[in-house]
Image: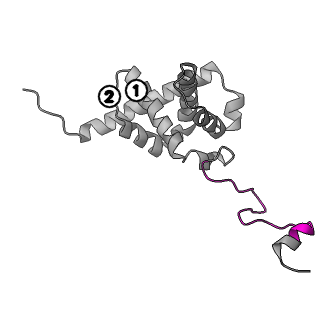
Amino acid sequence: MSSDPVVLRAAGSAYLGRYRSATRPWYPPGSCWASPEDSTDHPGLRRSQALAVKHLAASQRLPMTQRQAGELVRTRRDLRDAVLVWTYVWELDRRARNKGKGPVVHRIWRAIPSQTRRALTADRVWSARQQVLDATRQFLNDVSPNQARPRQA
């Protein structure tokens, strides 16, 4: 038998394509079918998460920049699920006001673990919101002493 890929495919053997593996199909990183670990590294998703955190902080009159929000999302892996849930709900609200982006909302939905998706309730959303707010306050308190404040005369 020949080792030519076309012949192997025609013979029905276990030919694995260029990007395939025997254990898991290959999907491009950031695609909605990739694993949740891959999909949270997509720049649009991370930007959306940072924007949701920034707006949540602003609603509580906490001064937070986009860069600080992005750093919080990037560094606090323990907040991953809470930030995803809050970002998903925030994006749904934006979408209802014709401001949201459909593909980003779908990517966020696919990045949320399936157990959380099945049990997504209002209590779970409020809990996620509170976790994000607490982490935001802690982050801003840790950052504030390191920043030079202007003198008041």
Q: Amino acid at mark 1?
A: Ala
Question: Can the viewer see residue 35?
Answer: yes
**Mark 1 crowd level (few <14, some 14–19, many ≥20, 10 Å Cα):** some
Checking the image for residue 107, the label placed there is none
Dots 1, 2 in contact, CB < 8 A: yes
Colour convention of the picture:
one colour
Q: Residue at x 45, y 33 (%)?
A: 51
Q: Amino acid at mark 2?
A: Pro
20 or 138: nearer the viewer:
20
Q: Position of residue 99 (x, y in %)?
A: 51, 25
Q: Is residue 110 above or below residue 124?
A: below
First in sequence: mark 1 vs mark 2: 1
Residue assigned mark 2: 63
Q: Which residues are magenta?
A: 8-30
- In the picture, the quarter occupied by the N terminus is bottom right
Q: In the figure, is residue 136 to the left or right of 118? A: left
Residue assigned mark 1: 57
Magenta span: predominant SS is loop
Q: Position of residue 43 (x, y in %)?
A: 50, 45
Residue 10 picture quarter: bottom right
